[in-house]
Amino acid sequence: MAQIYVASPFFSPEQVDRVKRLEAALSANPTVTDFYSPRLHQDAEHEQFTKPWATEIFHRDMDQIAAADVIVTVLDFEAKNLDSGTAYELGVATMSHKPILALQEKDEAVNLMITESLHWYTKQVKDFETYDFKKLPAGEFVGEIL
């Protein structure tokens, strides 16, 4: 069973829809113990978007990445760029030697620093309902690399 951290932007209605569908797929997967999706954990002791709030959220998310067995990410692009917060989380995960599983529904070229850090890749959110988080099968990125 796997503890999962979901690294994904959730700033637009489209992004929220995508991550909600991913969360539902993970909830339906019998090999998932639990997952932490920052979208669901924005409440804090301090007022949102203040420096103390940012500090609290940052440390909470970093602790959750450290506690995770696996990182599941959404490669979601705005203006041909991956969300900077998601990219940062993937860098932390890579340096922590955690497998990164990626969902990319849109066709965008992906920077080699991301593609080379991935353990598994899919274009279909439903694949996360049946992915075996106990065995962690590998699958390479398929698409245009920058």
Image (cartoon, helix red, strand yellow):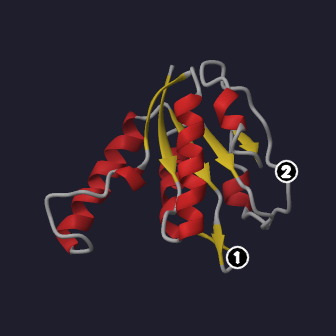
Q: Residue at x 75, y 45 (%)?
A: 124
Q: Nearer the viewer, residue 98 or 35?
A: 35
Numbered badge on residue 142: 2
| Badge 1 amino acid | Lys
Left or right for 47, reference 83: left
Q: Nearer the viewer, residue 115 or 10?
A: 10
Q: Residue at x 67, y 58 (%)?
A: 113
Give SS at disc 1.
loop
Seen as rendered, the residue at the extreme right is 143
**On the image, which quarter does residue 3 sit in?**
top left
Task: Report x, y in % for residue 16.
Answer: 52, 61
Q: Residue at x 41, y 43 (%)?
A: 65
Q: Residue at x 76, y 62 (%)?
A: 106
Q: Nearer the viewer, residue 108 or 26?
A: 26
The residue where tag 1 is placed is: 80
Label 2 crowd (10 A; few <14 / some 14-19 / many >=20): few
Task: Report x, y in % for residue 21.
Answer: 59, 48
Numbered badge on residue 58: none
The Cα–Cα distance between marks 2 and 1, rounded to whole angstroms, is 17 Å
| Badge 2 amino acid | Val
Q: Tell me: residue 54, above or below residue 115.
A: below
- Using the rendered image of the protein, determine whether residue 83 is visible from the camera's viewpoint: no
Task: Report x, y in % for residue 56.
Answer: 22, 58
**On the image, which quarter does residue 47 sit in?**
bottom left
Q: Quadrant of the C terminus?
A: bottom right
Left or right for 84, reference 141: left
Label 1 crowd (10 A; few <14 / some 14-19 / many >=20): few
Seen as rendered, the residue at the extreme bottom is 79
- Using the rendered image of the protein, determine whether residue 9 is visible from the camera's viewpoint: yes
Seen as rendered, the residue at the extreme left is 45
**On the image, which quarter does residue 71 sit in?**
top right
